[in-house]
Image (cartoon, grey):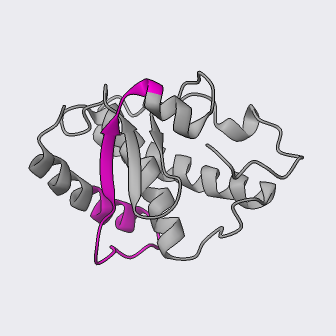
Amino acid sequence: MPNSNLLQELIVELLVAISGLSTYPVPDRPPEVVLISHQELEGMACDRPCEVYGWFPGGRTIFLDDRLNPVEETPAAGILVHELVHFLQQENGRFSNRRSCEDWVKREQEAYQIQIRWLRRQSAAGEPSIGIGPPPWRLIGCDDGTAGDKE
């Protein structure tokens, strides 16, 4: 589990990096990042067993799987980048219709694009591997309008 002061410093650094990779300004107040068990995260984000590592339900709190150490592990920091992008999207009123399939897909695409660009800048190999599977919009049909419920 990362030191909370180091995690707070990382959050600020990542927000600055995301700002440089996007049009989002650095917010005056960063979100809180809470590390919880994978089982708790599944219950909150999926309502069933699933491969979830981070979740931003809206508001000011991001939840991360407590098996991750974003301070010391670049792929884990990449997951935090993805969730921070969602926080910045909220703070800037982007894709505000979370129940719209189209907005949900655009929201996820942007978060994955920024996450992957950030990871590539961190990696000498240039290709992220862990924590990046097929983007969810390729796996989940969202014709029913509920795509924005959970990631």
* Position above or below: 64 against 23: above
* Position above or below: 34 against 89: above
The percent position of residue 38, horizontal first and vertical second, equals 42, 26
What residue is at 54 percent from the left and 46 percent from the top? 112
Mark yes or no: residue 22 visible. yes
The percent position of residue 126, horizontal first and vertical second, equals 39, 34
The percent position of residue 122, horizontal first and vertical second, equals 29, 41
Q: Nearer the viewer, residue 75 or 124?
A: 75
Q: Nearer the viewer, residue 143 or 129?
A: 143
Residue at the extreme top: 49
Mark yes or no: residue 130 visible. no
The quadrant in which the N terminus is found is: top left
Going by the image, does 56 lie left or right of 34? right
Going by the image, does 109 lie left or right of 3? right
What residue is at 79 percent from the left and 49 percent from the top? 146
Q: Nearer the viewer, residue 42 or 103?
A: 42
State yes or no: residue 32 in magenta.
yes
Q: Which of 125 and 70 is in front in this view?
A: 70
Location of residue 88 (image quadrant) = bottom left
What residue is at 63 percent from the left and 57 percent from the top? 107
* Position above or below: 146 against 96: above
Q: Give the range drawn in magenta.
A: 14-39
How many labels were placed on the picture?
A: 0
State yes or no: residue 25 in magenta.
yes
Location of residue 79 (image quadrant) = top left
What residue is at 46 percent from the left and 24 percent from the top? 39
